[in-house]
């Protein structure tokens, strides 16, 4: 039997991420700290590395602020690239056509679990 071993890197209550909001978190992997964020849309969550495909800058302009003004798309604070929440696809800006790096996310008994 073969399978992929998943590493859990973060867990929180679904209530910690209000509807339509995003929350950043960090994970220690070896000697390195990586920055990620989780977005909630209804009963679904999406998680990505907090690194813009354009230059690698963090997306949030202040902690946990990942959305554009209309709150429809994720927005990079550095040069304004816009990304679809559900796919991480850049739909406007200097990295159009590129994707945010996704993480695996699941909700089990109202707990959000993020794995690599
Ligand atoms: S660093 Fe994100 S758009 Fe340039």
Image (cartoon, rainbow, N blue to C red):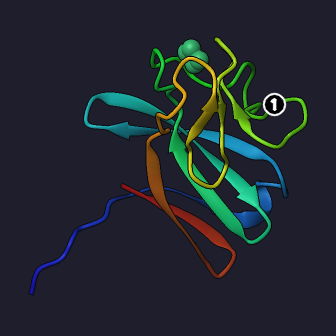
**Residue placed most toward the observer, 32 or 38:** 38
Locate the C terminus by quadrant: bottom left
Q: Is the shortest distance between ligand 1 and the CB of mark 1 under 8 Å?
A: no
Residue 14 falls in image quadrant: bottom right
Work out whether 21 lies above or below 63: below
Residue drawn 64% across and 12% down? 78
Residue drawn 78% across and 35% down? 67
**Element under disc 1:** loop
Residue 33 falls in image quadrant: top left
Residue that sits furthest to the bottom in the current view: 1
Q: Quadrant of ligand 1?
A: top right
**Residue placed most toward the observer, 105 or 108:** 105
| Residue on which the image places disc 1 | 68
Locate the N terminus by quadrant: bottom left
Task: Name the spot of residue 28 as percent of width and height, x first.
Answer: 38, 37
Residue that sits furthest to the right in the current view: 70
Work out whether 50 lies above or below 1: above
Task: Name the spot of residue 25 as percent of width and height, x first.
Answer: 58, 40
79 to the left or right of 1 = right
Task: Name the spot of residue 102 as percent of width and height, x first.
Answer: 46, 49
67 to the left or right of 36 = right
């Amino acid at each position: 039997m073969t399978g992929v071993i998943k590493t859990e890197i973060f867990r929180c209550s679904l209530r910690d991420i209000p509807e339509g909001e995003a929350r950043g978190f960090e994970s220690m992997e070896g000697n390195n700290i990586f920055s990620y964020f989780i977005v909630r849309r209804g009963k679904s969550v999406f998680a990505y590395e907090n690194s813009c495909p354009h230059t690698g800058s963090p997306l949030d302009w202040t902690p946990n602020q990942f959305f554009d003004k209309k709150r429809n798309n994720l927005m990079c604070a550095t040069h304004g690239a816009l990304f679809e929440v559900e796919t991480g696809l850049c739909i406007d800006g200097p990295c159009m056509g590129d994707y945010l790096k996704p993480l695996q996310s699941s909700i089990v008994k109202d707990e959000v679990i993020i794995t690599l």
